[in-house]
């Protein structure tokens, strides 16, 4: 697809977890550069890479950090990740260039506010840019 350069969203394997939530420290969230956002935490052994031309400039036009509560963002991310992964598995109906790889988002882990904020906004960006509609997404994308 000519408008799609690369979407790489990786949530690498997670370290052993208890049944309680683990908190991700804000200092573990890495910087933004050249339309690539990298979020990593060595203690939880995960990494998210968002490589998307235009995402960074789009993000600054959205509601600022702190606007949504973390519980709201976690709930939306659960819906979006579930739908995204369903589409990855159902590759006969959905474009494999858009839905390349499943996202390993552990619902019982507390990734912290910033991770959830960026992931939530990436899903909004993804829906808007590629004209996709997820349950719980914005009703009027364009």
Image: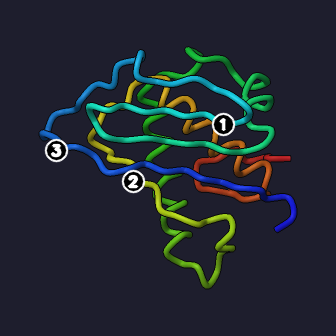
Q: CA distance from mark 1 to mark 3?
A: 28 Å
Q: Secondary structure at mark 1?
A: strand
Residue picked out by circle 3 = 16
Residue picked out by circle 1 = 36
Q: Secondary structure at mark 2?
A: loop
> Which residue is nearer to you in this view: 37 or 57?
37
Q: Pinpoint residue 77: horizontal percent, then vertical percent.
A: 49, 43
Q: Give the vertical position of 79 relative to 50 (above or below).
A: below
Residue picked out by circle 2 = 104
Q: Give the vertical position of 107 relative to 94 (above or below).
A: above
The residue lying at 69 percent from left, 73 percent from top is 95
Q: Secondary structure at mark 3?
A: loop
The residue lying at 56 percent from left, 69 percent from top is 87
User: Disc 2 or 1, which lies upstream in sequence?
Assistant: 1
- 10 Å neighbourhood of mark 2: few (<14), some, or many (≥20)? some
Label 1 or label 3, whichever lies nearer to me, is 1
The residue lying at 26 percent from left, 31 percent from top is 43
Q: Give the vertical position of 142 relative to 3 (above or below).
A: above
> Which residue is nearer to you in this view: 96 or 87?
96
């Amino acid at each position: 697809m000519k408008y799609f350069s690369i979407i790489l969203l990786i949530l690498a394997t997670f370290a052993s977890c208890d049944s309680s939530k683990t908190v991700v420290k804000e200092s573990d969230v890495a910087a933004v550069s050249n339309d690539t956002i990298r979020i990593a935490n060595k203690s939880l052994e995960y990494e998210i890479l968002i490589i998307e031309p235009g995402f960074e400039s789009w993000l600054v036009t959205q509601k600022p950090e702190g606007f949504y509560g973390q519980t709201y963002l976690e709930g939306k991310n659960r819906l979006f990740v579930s739908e995204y992964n369903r589409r990855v598995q159902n590759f006969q109906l959905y474009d494999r260039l858009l839905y390349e790889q499943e996202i390993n988002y552990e619902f019982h882990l507390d990734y912290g506010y910033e991770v959830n904020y960026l992931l939530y906004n990436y899903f909004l960006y993804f829906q808007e840019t590629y004209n996709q509609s997820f349950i719980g997404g914005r009703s009027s994308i364009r």
